[in-house]
Image (cartoon, helix red, strand yellow):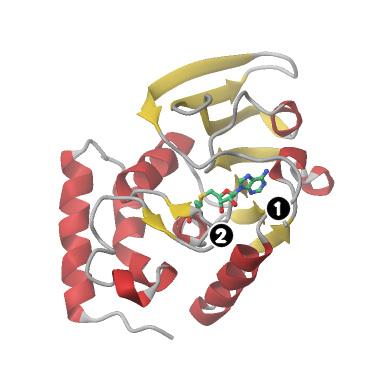
Amino acid sequence: MPTDTFRHKGLRKRMIETLIAKGITDKKVLEAMNEVPRHFFLDSSFDNIAYEDRALQISCLQTISQPSTVALQTQLLKIEPRLKVLEIGTGSGYQTAILHRFNVRLYTIERQKDLYDQAKQMFHLLNIRPHCYYGDGYKGLPGYSPFDRVLVTCGAAKIPLELFRQLKVGGIMVIPVGRGVQTMLRITKTSETEYKKEEFGTFTFVPMLKDKAK
Ligand code: SAH
């Protein structure tokens, strides 16, 4: 188990100041970002840069999102306690741990077995129990739908229809959409077939891929 030293806590306070400067206003989001030790989710060689506002390499050629992106996506979700939340792209598990602070019913899917295994191990150490699934996020989790919130943490070419289907009417999906570069979208489902779309700038995510990698 890594340790969370005063130095890490100090670096995290500075990260929070950066997030505020970048427009994150939701107190609960800032609180969660201050509480979850990001360096736990990274290789120890990144210890000195774990709290800089940048994406960093994790296993399987994937990345942990930049803190300001994690904070923005979380803020856009407008989470309330006890909602049912589905995350696509567990990756390191950092974003999952942030969502967990909101006291929600949390489901997360990862298509890379190594990342799935490592994240589960970290959740175990942190004594948190999100429902973790190894599989294809495009399929969602029909057995547990509908979801109040869906958060996609990889770049999708378009809004995945199956995930839209599994979203409750009145529910919110936050998803970066586009090939190469993505636009951050907040989709609010207004009826079984309609939605309202809001845009929040451009980002570069690792791609949302179909089928399992081997
Ligand atoms: N939330 C993560 C971000 C990791 S990057 C974190 O905080 O670390 C995005 C992740 O999405 C990668 O781990 C990638 O393997 C995963 N991914 C890509 N396509 C996927 C799919 N179809 N289903 C599930 N996970 C997927």
Q: Is residue 21 above or below residue 125?
A: above
Cβ of disc 2 within 8 Å of ligand 1?
A: yes
Decide if residue 49 is on the left or right side of residue 116.
Answer: left
Decide if residue 108 is on the left or right side of residue 162.
Answer: left
Q: Which residue is mark 1?
A: 213
Q: For mark 1, give the secondary structure.
A: loop
Q: Earlier in the sequence, mark 2 or mark 1?
A: 2
Q: Is residue 188 above or below residue 71?
A: above
Q: Is residue 38 above or below residue 90?
A: below
Neighbor class of circle 1 (other Cα within 10 Å; few <14, some 14-19, many 20+) is: few
Which quadrant does the C terminus fall into? bottom right
Residue at image location 60% in from the left, 26% down from the top:
157
Q: Position of residue 83 (x, y in %)?
A: 60, 47
Q: Position of residue 156 (x, y in %)?
A: 59, 31
Decide if residue 184 is on the left or right side of residue 127.
Answer: left
Q: Which residue is mark 2?
A: 60
Q: Are marks 2 and 1 in contact (CB under 8 Å)?
A: yes
Cβ of disc 1 within 8 Å of ligand 1?
A: yes
Q: Position of residue 1 (x, y in %)?
A: 44, 86
Toward the viewer: 31 or 114? Answer: 114
Q: Which mark is residue 12?
A: none
The CA span between labels 2 and 1 is 10 Å
Residue type for callout 2: Cys
